[in-house]
Amino acid sequence: MTAINDPPVALSIAGSDSGAGAGIQADIKTMAALGVFATTAVTAVTAQNTTSVREVHYVPTDMVDAQIDAVLDDLSVVSVKTGMLGTPAVVESVGRRAAEGGLPQLVVDPVMVASSGRIFLTPEGVEAYRTHLLPEALIATPNLWEASLLAGGTPSESDDVDSMIEMARRIHGLGPTWVLVKGGHLPGVESHDPGAAPVQVADVLFDGREVTVLTGAHVDTSNTHGTGCSLSSAIAAYLAHGADVTTAVTAAKEFVHGALLGGAEWHLGGGHGPLNHLGWKGEPPAGIRTRF
């Protein structure tokens, strides 16, 4: 039973990031910032920081299932997002559960490519997404590299908005109700040379009928680790609050833009640093001493 003052509950099925910039940790922070109670099922434990992923340990499928069961048996989950699932068996298991109606308002962030461009999901895992999970998604949110894999192309073909639209159409044909192809890896977007990066960054949203190109101001920062995780979990959070898909996507983009701006000047780690999910201003709480 849900009381009138209870926050909505969402579930993240994803991997853990020890550096806490992405994965489950980013999902929890994002959902909390947006007034949603985040529950979790951990699919993988990674040893990573802002510079690299050092090791990955995949959680056995039956343990992933047990975590999901424990959450759903006790809490009224109203939206779900998936992140890094890791193995074909987990992808298939989550897809099967979704097909049975157990994962409402499913946001599929098909995490299968590292920020370096290295593919860390086997071809069997990619096919499991195509066959078992994407058909059950309310919305899929691949970046350009992931969209290329799912659409059967190559990343080199994904260099402009027209190619993003074509990939969105192909992925929609696999079954998701909506597709959001993210343009954060378009040529030039990640450049930090003065004047090199575009003023606006485009994402493509497609519902099977209408293509919408959503643009947002570029934020010149190297602190972008966890941007995709944060966007998909923000979409799930807004869906949990009752927003429709278009509203959820638009609001989620605004949230991530603010988080990028908020952390743009941070110097946490030696690589791609995290976002400022919680709107920290840099000052400690009142009454807390920072020097001893």
Image: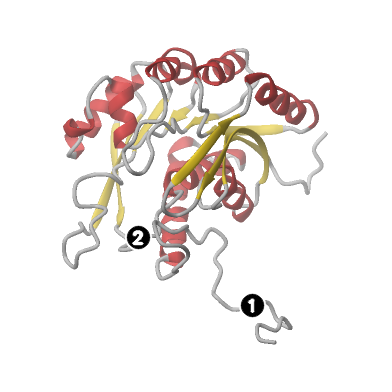
Q: Label 2 crowding class (10 Å Cα cut-off): few <14, some 14-19, many 20+? A: many
**Left or right of 217, for residue 60:** right
The one of 271 and 261 positioned closer to us in this rendering? 271
Q: Which mark is residue 112?
A: none
To which residue does mark 2 refer? Answer: 222
- The answer to whether residue 209 of the structure is visible from this angle is no
Q: Secondary structure at mark 2?
A: loop
Q: Quadrant of the N terminus?
A: top right
**Left or right of 139, for residue 95:** right
Image quarter of residue 210: top left
**Left or right of 68, for residue 230:** left
Residue 64 location, x and y as percent?
66, 25
Label 1 vs 2, first from the N-terminus? 2
State the residue at coordinates (71%, 28%). 67
Residue 219 location, x and y as percent?
33, 61
The one of 247 and 58 positioned closer to us in this rendering? 58
The one of 58 and 143 positioned closer to us in this rendering? 58
- Residue 127 sits above or below residue 242 on the image: above
- The answer to whether residue 6 of the structure is visible from this angle is yes
State the residue at coordinates (54%, 65%). 279
Residue type for callout 1: Pro
- Residue 69 sits above or below residue 222 on the image: above
Scheme by which the image is coloured: secondary structure
Marks 1 and 2 sit apart, C-alpha to C-alpha, by 24 Å
Residue 236 location, x and y as percent?
55, 39
To which residue does mark 1 refer? Answer: 284
State the residue at coordinates (51%, 34%). 83
Image quarter of residue 90: top right
- Residue 70 sits above or below residue 250 on the image: above
